[in-house]
Amino acid sequence: MRVEPMIAPIAERIRPSDDLLDRIRSAVGPKGWLSESADMVRFEREERGLYIGKAALVVRPASTDEVAEVLRICNRERIAVVPQGGNTGLVGGGVPHATGNEIVLSLSRMNRIRGLDIENDTILAEAGCILADIQKAAADADRYFALSLGAEGTCQIGGNLSTNAGGSNVLRYGMARDQVLGLEVVLADGRVLSSLSGLRKDNTGYDLKQLFMGSEGTLGIITAATLKLHPAPREVETCLIALPTPKAVVELLGRAKAGSGGNCIAFEFTQRRLIDFVLKHIPGTSDPFERPHPWYVLAEFAAGDMGGALKGMVERMLGQALEDGLALDAVIAASAAQRKALWKLRESMTEAQKPEGGSIKHDVSVPVSKLPTFVERASALCEGMVPGSRVCAFGHAGDGNIHFNVSQPVGGDRAAFMSGMDAMNHAVHAIVAELDGSISAEHGIGRLKRDKLPYYKSAVALDMMRSIKHTLDPNGILNPGKVIPD
Ligand code: FAD
Ligand code: MLT
Ligand code: ZN
């Protein structure tokens, strides 16, 4: 019989005393903490404003030892700790509750690249390294770090690994966890699991690092990682293709992968509405086609030196799609500036939805073959539930991840529309479940989907998660109230 841990819900936790806060402050030194409300507010608000919490203190340790010391104190005194990276998470996982009895531990000051091994194709980065900085360090060494997402200028690799982020390159390179060879993690009791090896083969017992990736700060605090590097591409082709239907999107995906010899690294899709939002709200964006089309794909191909053959392969594949009537129009970026402009259309979609009012969001995945069925059924369902609501379906078609967001009716009441979020989520997730999909493709569970998990995870799976949580964090101090349903 499993002993249920006696862990108080977050609201009943003690507020850290001044003396305790002083001990934590001295563990990180004068540069390592913030306690003024004005300084802490940016660590307390979630990206979409869905969750706004209150921290007892924000600590910003500069080293693994300082992280370990803070956790030793908090574990002994049962003080909750919310790990935070770039705070771009979209499920409320990285911000404190409003109770004011949690410490936010930001990894921002641990942002050193500790090493780069060219012959081993690995880079060793601390958790607070911003994703774009790691991409640049790799490029400077004529290598390619494969994780890429819209928030890469702000999000940090520690947060990427803790959410097992996806982004636009999953199609060829996999998720965040697939970029990792080694990890350094501070456990709830302050012990340090240091397994930063850059080995590609190491079968010596359980692969413990895997536990922490995707655990959203509930099992340990990632302080560094050894990451895989790839050869820098020598040929890159980026194109925007106009299509009639989601079914055509999926058919084109097959042709893009086959026609480019497996060199398709990104395959993003969107319906026209998001393009309209971006053109309306994001300065410096333009439509490369003469007239609007119902669906679009942004596809990127990359390869080593093929003597310029990649462009011909892409042109032939697109030419055939146009000839067959599968594609309605297509443009291949003729310069780096044009490539950047096409990606700006895509990466601006998150921002461009905000001025359109309330948005009920779904970060779901289905088998690629079922993407058209999902889009069709979920669109009809949502527009039926709320007449005048505006479906915005876009995302990473290459891996079956649809960001199925629904904007409120024009001129509608935001609060009234958002009050229907749970009902709409439930109805959309039911379609996802019928199509053997997932209710969280890449953003994670956090607070937003914690109570939904029991509907989609078996009792055995939830029981195992709780057992692992209890083993690694018996006092329940790491990010309480996130991921694991009470
Ligand atoms: P935070 O938001 O700070 O934290 C995220 C979670 O990880 C929290 O639960 C936190 O407690 C935990 N955590 C953070 N650092 C650590 C650590 N060192 N150790 C342990 N736990 C930690 N996500 C995608 O997957 N794909 C996308 O394409 C994508 N596009 C986005 C576009 C935009 C414009 C925005 C705003 C967000 C997007 N996201 C996307 C979501 C977000 O960027 C990712 O979830 C990202 O991985 C979060 O990283 P972060 O450093 O901001 O983490
Ligand atoms: C993206 O791919 O743009 C994000 O994951 C989706 C979002 O920000 O809603
Ligand atoms: Zn995404």
Image (cartoon, rainbow, N blue to C red):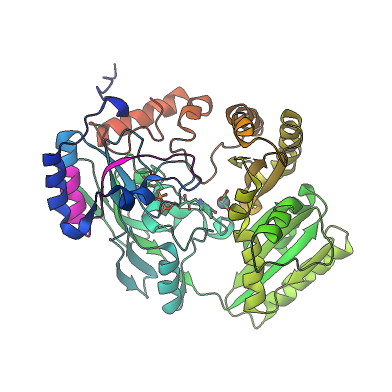
Along the line of sight, which residue is nearer the eye, 70 or 95? 95
Compared across the picture, whether 409 is left or right of 351 comes to right
Numbered range of the magenta stretch: 49-72
Check the image and name the residue furthest to the bottom: 307
Compared across the picture, whether 200 is left or right of 22 comes to right
Q: Where is residue 358 in the image (x, y as percent from the top left)?
A: 61, 40
- Above or below for 113 versus 442: below
Image quadrant in which you'd find residue 461: top left
Q: The C terminus appears in which quarter of the rendering? A: top left
Q: Inspect the magenta stretch and tell me whether residue 67 lies in it.
A: yes
- Above or below for 254 versus 402: below
Question: Visible in this render: residue 263?
Answer: no
Compared across the picture, whether 74 is left or right of 97 comes to left
> What residue lies at 28% left-to-right and 20% top-to-bottom?
4
Question: Visible in this render: residue 232?
Answer: yes
Along the line of sight, which residue is nearer the eye, 242 or 144? 242
What is the tally of numbered marks visible in this picture? 0
> What residue lies at 46% left-to-right and 63% top-to-bottom?
153
Image quadrant in which you'd find residue 60: bottom left
Q: Position of residue 329 (x, y in %)?
A: 82, 64
> What residue lies at 71% left-to-right and 68% top-to-bottom?
239
Compared across the picture, whether 49 is left or right of 475 comes to right
Q: Position of residue 63 (x, y in %)?
A: 21, 59
Q: Inspect the magenta stretch and tell me whether residue 186 lies in it.
A: no
Q: Where is residue 479 in the image (x, y as percent from the top left)?
A: 33, 38
Q: The N terminus appears in which quarter of the rendering? A: top left
Along the line of sight, which residue is nearer the eye, 74 or 14? 14
